[in-house]
Amino acid sequence: MAAAILVAAPAIGVSAQEPVRLSAGDSIRVDGEIVGTILNINGPMMTVLSREAPRCRAGEMHGDAPICDPAPLIRHTVSLEEV
């Protein structure tokens, strides 16, 4: 039992968190919510595809239910240093 603790103790002190590696197709999350998907990484820059909020208006000739257009897609170019 004591040998197992001695063997495990150095591993805990030596281990370090690996740096984050991003690649195309990865989802980017902020506060647990997906905000976009990486399209490509070109040098120090990456292109992220995300959606705006859907555009809704009050129901016209369809009762009170809102009618929503699909959320538009937006491309952002972001520096990897900002991530």
Image (cartoon, rainbow, N blue to C red):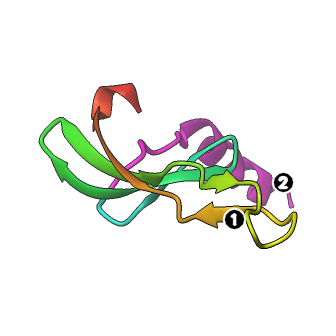
Determine whether 25 is above or below 41 in the image. Answer: below
Marks 1/2: CA distance? 67 Å
Query: What is the secondary structure assignment of the residue under circle 2?
Result: helix
Q: Residues within 10 Å of mark 2 (few under 14, many from 20)?
A: few
Marked residue nearer the N-terminal end (1 or 2): 2
Instruction: Pick out the residue farthest to the bottom.
Output: 62
Residue that appears at 20% across and 38% down: 45
- Identified at 69% across, 41% down, the residue is 31
Query: Would residue 11 be found to the left or right of residue 42 on screen?
Result: right
Give the residue type at disc 2.
Answer: Ala
| 19 displayed left or right of 68 | left
- The quarter of the picture where residue 77 lies is top left
In the picture of the structure, the residue carrying the numbered disc 1 is 67
Identify the residue at horizontal 83%, vertical 66% (top origin): 65
Residues in magenta, as a range = 1-22
Q: Position of residue 5 (x, y in %)?
A: 78, 52
Name the spot of residue 71 as percent of width and height, x first: 52, 59
Looking at the picture, tell me which residue is in the foreground, 28 or 36.
36
Q: Which residue ends up furthest to the left in the rendered image?
A: 43
Q: Tell me if residue 11 is in the magenta stretch.
A: yes
According to the picture, the residue beneath numbered tag 2 turns out to be 2
Which of the image's four quarters has the C terminus?
A: top left
For the N terminus, the quadrant is bottom right
Q: Position of residue 6 (x, y in %)?
A: 72, 48
Image disc number at residue 29: none
